Image (cartoon, rainbow, N blue to C red):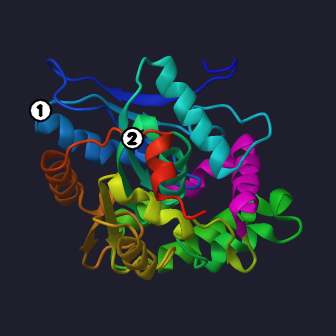
Amino acid sequence: MLHGRRIGYLHLLPEGAPTDDPLVLVHGLAGTSATWKPLLAELDRRGRTREVIAVDLPGHGRSQRPHGDYSIAGYANVVRDLLVGLGHRHVTLVGHSLGGGVALQFSYQFPQMCGRVVLVDSGGLGTGVSRAIRAANLPGTAVALPLIANRLTVALARAVVGRRVEARELVEHFGTLASRDARTSFVRTVRASVGLGGQRVSATEKLYLAEDLPSLVIWGTEDRVIPVGHGRRAADLMPGSRLVELEGAGHFPHVAQPAWFADVLLGFLDETTPARLDVEDLAHHVDA
């Protein structure tokens, strides 16, 4: 429970003393913590050296709907409060799609808690997004969403034709919209950050603030939900960041190739030292 409401998460505990900060995984729009199960299996197979927490954002998975704040900042607050409740004060954030926007916002709002950030086919880095997602802004969407969800799944699945694992992941994502609470959260979350013209929330003008934060950007080259150009531009704007592209993958590289993804992620974690930042570090960089 968190603030009197149910919050779900998957938890992988280290086998001995942890060797690093906890790893926090944040899913994307209409997703759940289950999207990370292939990665969790890989991490488990390689030996549990760090704690891993895969959260269900409010209104997703096993977490109840929020009271009313469906913004990226609101979700970042929930992640912060969950971590504090679990006794953690410093973590590495990995965010996919919507979760990437949440991870970026978390690093900006709570620099003292974020040691590294990993963005996976992330939202919040430009306006481009699939027309199928933008359509959630049309009048009557909430009422018609069960039918729209079927069409949305088909439209997005066509974008990953030939990639059966990713197509199956899309079906699982939008299959969650059978729940009225999930439909409400989906529509309100989309409308909080995406308009008919595309994404409305962008962190690009603040990415220079990540200069002292070890950052990794991972993207599928064939992503038809959020274009790979967003990742390339973000990597250019984040001083010292790394960009790794998975050739032929779509919007879910962590699902398409979990062993490859684990190699890239663990390599990044092994080669970097978590930042220890505070508001004064941000103030040093802010263009006023």
Q: Is residue 71 magenta?
A: no
Please state which amino acid type lies under the numbered disc 1: Gly
Report whether 239 appears left or right of 182: left
Q: Residue at x 14, y 18 (%)?
A: 16
Is residue 122 something one can see in this rendering? Answer: no
Which of the numbered marks, if any, corresponds to residue 277?
A: 2
Image quadrant occupied by the C terminus: bottom right
**Which residue in the rendered view is the most extreme toward the left?**
46
The local crowd at label 1, few if under 14, some if 14 to 19, many if 20 or more residues have their Cα within 10 Å, is few
Classify the position of the N terminus by image quarter: top right
Dot 1 falls on a residue whose secondary structure is loop
Position of 229 with respect to 196 (left or right) is left
Span of residues in magenta: 172-194
Q: Give the label, 1 or 2, closer to the camera.
A: 2
Residue 165 percent coordinates (x, y): 34, 63
Q: Residue 287, how many percent across, how many down?
A: 55, 64
Q: Give 51 or 168, whichever is nearer the viewer.
A: 51
> At 69% across and 45% down in the image, what residue appears?
182
Mark 2: amino acid: Leu
Task: Please check the rendered image and state whether residue 176 is part of the magenta-colored stretch, yes or no.
Answer: yes
Q: Residue at x 53, y 73 (%)?
A: 156
- 236 to 284, vertically: above or below: below
The disc label shown at residue 47, or none = 1
Q: Nearer the viewer, residue 168 or 223?
A: 223
**Quadrant of the rendered image containing residue 155:** bottom right
From the viewer's side, name the closer residue of 236 and 60: 236
